[in-house]
Amino acid sequence: MSSERGFLAIFECHFSGLFLFSLIRKSGYGVLAFLVSLTFLCFLARDHLNQKVYPFGDLAADMLLADLIESSGHMLTGHYSRFEFNHPGPFFFYANYVVDAGFSPLLIGRYNTWVLSVLLLNSLFIGISAFLVTRVQVQGIRHQWIAPLIFTFFILLILKDKAITWWMPWRLVLPYLAFLLTLPYIIQRRFEYLPLAVLLACIVIHGYVLLPFFTLPLLFVGILTGLLYRPHWPNQKEWTCFFISALVAIAFILPILIDVFVNEPSNLDKILKASRMIGRAKHPSWSESFEFMKHFWKRFLVWPWPYWFLGILAGTIILLKGDRGTKRDFLLMIGVCLFVTGFFVWFFTNVRKPLEHFTGYYYSAVPIVLCAFAIANGARITPPMCFKSLVGQRITAVLISACVFIGILHYSAYARLVPSTNPDIHKISKAIIHHTSRFGEARIDYHYSALFYRRS
């Protein structure tokens, strides 16, 4: 890598990765969840890792855009939007670039390394989430291991192939889910989790232009509530957390600011222009926005399995038999999800029609995290509730974990998720280069998702 490209890649990717790994290292449960997730996802994506794939469509456009890291030495914006701007930041492109540089000798092609990047990042986000689920529990209670394990299994079981897709709307679900899990800590003035919350917020903001509206207000309200929760002047440890959070935010804001000062018009100008255009368009009604929100609950919790029933049962067990800390954190999680849901319904009455599901896939994290949190902690409470003897509790805990694990194995053993490929793309590009070689250099130019050829 050139020095400039290496600087940006380290700032955007290695800095974030080391920070995340340092967090899950403090919890064996987080490391265990990372390894279990990575193993399952690699098995599920086995055809995506060992087959030659010729990308087309959005993926091909993203790969052409990622060539800017090689040709220009840096990248300042994210992937394309159909409204003729790019999404805010390049974090996911740099993550793909780093994995591609490290693993390209071991895999067949660029598509395979990009899929591996997805698997590594998503496993990391699941590990972080399991780490957070472990921390909400009161220390000293038996069978704490069952909550992060069941949480991990449930996330893998409910997302399935969505956890291995390269498509950006789905890649935002797991980091946003982990972000939501940090909020109960911040509300309780446990600001040692604020740098992690800011990091996760910055990651999803880089991925999608609407995510500042679904992260920054939550952070602001969470910090304000935390300061009021225990009203006293911040101590040195809390000031340190604020300082680290500011450094994390600056690292992610930097490429956006550079783009503002270097390019004319900047990507931010294009985003603001598109928002003014959307503001003049016809907007959905409240009922349409509410139906839009309901879609994500039905998609994951109703069909094909009634996960909502398990979630309600587990939530009832927590409220009736849970310890004080688990009850408090579960109620806070409910409050966070209700706040996000209400804001989501209101927000989508102010966008242009029609409402398209991919614009709200990140919201899928809300029903998933609420249900997974309830089931994981309900499963932890169940063994001592059923048996007084330690042996009986251990047997119950193992049986619960085994049932979910067998469900995952059953799905992954029979799932055959064949990657989409188009060999004609490769043939066309070779033909273009062959037939235009007498004109000099052949180059493929691109403008958003519409690719066109130009001779030079």
Image (spheres, grey):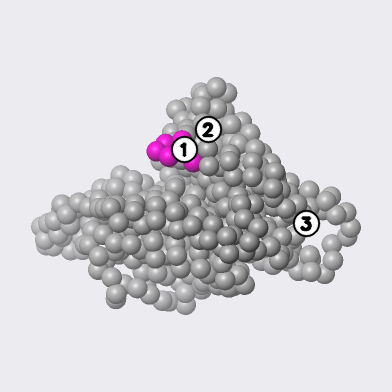
- Place residue 116 in its image quadrant: bottom left
Residue type (three-letter) at the residue carrying disc 3: Arg
Image position of 427 (left or right of 42): left
Question: Which residue is drawn at the image coordinates 84% and 50% (left, top)?
Answer: 228
Q: Main secondary structure of the magenta part?
A: loop
Tell which of 398 and 85 is nearer to you. 398
Of callouts 1 and 2, which one flags the residue occurring earlier in the amino acid sequence?
2
Dot 3 falls on a residue whose secondary structure is loop
Evaluate whether residue 268 shows in this view. Answer: no
Horizontal side of residue 421 vs 265, given as left or right: left
Tell me which label, 1 or 3, sits earlier in the chain. 3
- Give the label on residue 306, or none: 1
Tell me the crowding category of disc 2: few under 14, some 14 to 19, or many 20 or more residues within 10 angstroms, Cα based.
Answer: many
Dots 3, 2 in contact, CB < 8 A: no
Badge 1 element = loop
Q: Disc 2 marks which residue?
A: 293
Q: Position of residue 43 (x, y in %)?
A: 33, 62
Q: CA distance from mark 1 to mark 2?
A: 18 Å
Quick one: 30 or 123, which is closer to the camera?
A: 30
Residue 21 placement (x, y as % from top left): 55, 71
Magenta span covers which residues? 302-307
Counting from the top left corner in percent of width and height, residue 118 is at 41, 60
Whether residue 276 appears in magenta in the rendering, the answer is: no
Q: Report which quarter residue 2 is drawn in.
A: bottom left
What's the CA distance linking mark 3 and mark 2?
30 Å
Which of label 1 and label 2 is nearer to you?
A: 1
Magenta span contains residue 305: yes
Locate the N terminus and report the quarter of the image it occupies: bottom left
